[in-house]
Image (tube, grey):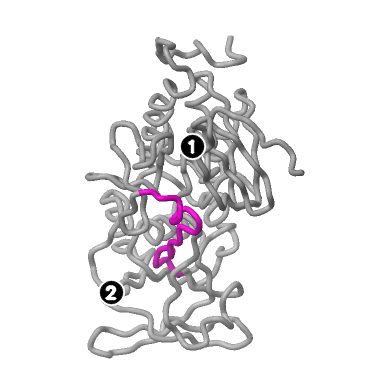
Amino acid sequence: MSAAPHRTDVAVIGAGPTGLFAVFECGMLKMSCHVIDALDMVGGQCAALYPEKPIYDIPGHPSIDAADLIDRLAAQAAPFAPTYHLGQQVETLTRTDEGRWLLETSIGTRIDAGAVIIAAGAGAFGPNRPPLDGLESFEGKSVFYMVRRRQDFAGKRVVIAGGGDSAVDWTLSLADIAEKVYVVHRRAKFRAAPESVARMEALARDGRVEMVVPYQLSGLEGADGLLTAVRVATLDGEEKALPADAMLAFFGLSMNLGPIAQWGLNLERNHIAVEPATAATSVPGVFAIGDIAAYPGKLKLILCGFAEAAQAAHAIHPLIHPGEALHFEYSTSKGVPGAE
């Protein structure tokens, strides 16, 4: 006979930034949380893909490394004693006779929750790889899809391929330590914060970054997994080689919802449709926040995920504490355990 399930007010699926902040918001409303994540650490993509990536849109922090942000969010949630179930994936979500939710994970952990917050980011994710011959032999040695240690690229000739925030942000970060930084993109327009793009263009004018546009990747040169050059080509087929020791390819993540797709939620292009004011999904008692949530005008910013976490927690409160009036305000100390 299996052990009795863990019982909690809220089950949070995903231990990334928005999931951790949801624990804090629920705690402030006197609701307990169990948190489940497929990774063996908290932090989601911030911890797994780019722990040293600078993040610029966190209020009060002109710049903060992803790993530092996760550490602070975990510390903020800690006074509310969340229980973490890491290295496992929620496989089934079932309504109980009591009107609660029973979650069962890939290793058999069972959690009985009054409500569920899905903060699963991009779901099960992996990098979109450029279609280059022999790419696999260079991966992990001189071709990378993330930066774990910025210092690994000190003094190297680095080709950064892509046109989004990651490509631009790492260009800004590595320009100070790399011998040479090339930015390869198929057009002159970048899908990144305008201020960051302006800073990158200023570096290019100063000769600290070389903009290789409009070009796209066409091949790799080297041996034994070590690059000597990255070949690029225009849309007209004009080719050239960029001397390089490393390439960072930032073409986004492939998204797979996994078991979440089977839970009867209203899905829109691999995202979960929610009510903007509450983060409620089409299934009563189940909420979605962060990158996985979709609604008109949605901005995929961490700070928007934080706001959604607060909205979800407030919407869940009457489900967990029916009939209890909510008188709530923030201050520098009120309501936070351990505050003086």
Q: Going by the picture, which residue comes out furthest to the right?
A: 1
Q: Viewer-proximal residue, 310 or 68?
A: 310
Q: Residue at x 59, y 88 (%)?
A: 223
Residue 178 location (% of width, % of height) = 50, 64
Q: Find out whether residue 169 is within the magenta segment.
A: no
Q: Find out whether residue 259 is within the magenta segment.
A: yes
Magenta range: 249-265
Residue 237 horizontal side relative to residue 284, left or right: left
Q: Viewer-proximal residue, 298 or 270?
A: 270
Q: Viewer-proximal residue, 325 or 207?
A: 325
The quadrant where residue 55 appears: top left
Residue 248 horizontal side relative to residue 216, left or right: right
Q: Could you tell which of marks 1 and 2 lies nearer the N-terminus?
A: 1
Residue 224 - label: none
Q: Dot 1 corresponds to which residue?
A: 116
> For the residue labelled by badge 2, is the local secondary structure a helix, a strand or a loop?
loop
Residue 186 - label: 2
The quadrant where residue 286 appears: top left
Image quarter (top left, top right, bottom left or bottom right) of the N terminus: top right
Q: Viewer-proximal residue, 313 or 297?
A: 313
> How far is disc 1 from disc 2 in space, using C-alphas?
42 Å
Q: Residues within 10 Å of mark 2 (few under 14, many from 20)?
A: some
162 above or below 23? below
Image quarter (top left, top right, bottom left or bottom right) of the C terminus: top right
Q: Amino acid at mark 2?
A: Arg
> For the residue labelled by badge 1, is the local secondary structure a helix, a strand or a loop?
strand
Residue 309 horizontal side relative to residue 1, left or right: left
